[in-house]
Image (cartoon, rainbow, N blue to C red):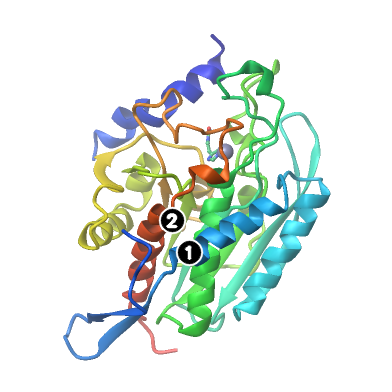
Amino acid sequence: MTNHKIMGLLLPFSFCGMLCSCSGSGNAPASTSVQNEKQEIPLSIPAFNADSAYQYVSRQMAFGNRIPNTEAHVQTAEWLAAELKRHGADVIVQEAPVVAFDKTVLNGKNIIGQFSPEKEDRVLLFAHWDSRPFADHDPNQANYQKPVPGANDGASGVGVLLEMARLIGQQQPEVGVDIIFFDAEDYGTPSFWKGAYQDNSWALGTQYWAKRPHRPGYRARYGILLDMVGAKDATFYKEAYSEYFAPSVVNKIWKTGRELGYENYFVDQEGGAINDDHYYVNTMMRIPSVDIIHLDPNSDTGFFPYWHTVGDTMDKIDPATLQAVGETVMHVIYTEKNRNAN
Ligand code: AHN
Ligand code: ZN
């Protein structure tokens, strides 16, 4: 068995010891009122609409595979930027030429939507929008060279964030929000690659951005990454890098999820350490960031059961999961207080 295969099989849960030892439904009301800490002004939190989020997932899928250097990829990028603009964000499309594991130059595009860019206190929400060219964990080896449709791996996180952008456009939280759709996350060294496995071959768009942020000196209070947040009965274990770099943000998200009745999704247990977009936001940008990612100790890979297979299709997406994640993250950012009056 090759080394990268071992990584793929064991990584999600096996790194836990190393890092951790030290340490609903679619029918939501139109908005929720929560009393603030001093019980003065009721806080209104726009209602996340799972059907709308589901449509946003499905519309990405309709473009075809979002693989860098393809026409479908260019078309999807244009649409994503236009949607963020339509919801009132200031949008920057950052061209991000990056070099893949096999030396292919990928014409990456990071799509950045800024809400209330003048506010100093900000939260960063992110997801990768590209889809993987190789289904290298498919049970059938004949599918290894086929693309991953990426309904869950890619489109689900973006779908939830587009729905959040729609709501933020209607009613801003106190903090400024940046939504970034990072490119070229999923072009990492495939299991069948004969050359060396390259750890840094994942999250290429994020690494590019972290070297050249869209605003020099860009800061955010914290970041939240959504990765594979759409499958039925998804389980979000507390990912180990998130716990290491951003323990208080992990606690806030998981506590909020529990309070909203989503404790079956937000499992109060450690998961393994995943080399994902948030790793570089943590280590290169020093913005404490959390990965909400579907980990499954019972699956062969440790991830969502259809991870990097040709079976990662729309029928695996359940609006109830999009609702649990979207509603939870909405509550987290709308209860975030502005420290300075902007
Ligand atoms: C690794 O397998 C090293 N990272 C997985 C990150 C990922 C890929 N998330 C979605 N697709
Ligand atoms: Zn992937």
- Quarter of the C terminus within the rendering: bottom left
Determine the secondary structure under disc 2.
helix
Q: Residue at x 31, y 75 (%)?
A: 335
101 to 227, vertically: above or below: above
User: Which labelled disc corresponds to residue 51?
Assistant: 1
Residue 339 location (% of width, % of height)? 35, 81
Query: Which residue extends farthest top?
Result: 1
Asked if the residue under mark 1 is in contact with the one under mark 2, i.e. CB atoms within 8 Å, the reply is yes
Q: Amino acid at mark 1?
A: Asp
Q: Residue at x 39, y 53 (%)?
A: 321
Callout 2 amino acid: Pro
Percent x, y for residue 68?
75, 45
Q: Which mark is residue 319?
A: 2
Mark 1 Cα shell of 10 Å, populated few (<14), some (14-19), many (≥20): some
If the image is split into quadrants, where does the N terminus sit?
A: top right
User: How many labels sit on residues?
Assistant: 2
Q: Which mark is residue 302?
A: none
Q: Is residue 294 left or right of residue 197?
A: left
Front-most of residues 96 and 326: 326
Q: Quadrant of residue 113?
A: bottom right
User: Where does residue 152 sit, x and y in percent of width and height?
Assistant: 53, 45
| Quadrant of residue 268 within the rendered picture | top left
Q: Is residue 63 left or right of residue 335?
A: right
42 shown above or below 81: below
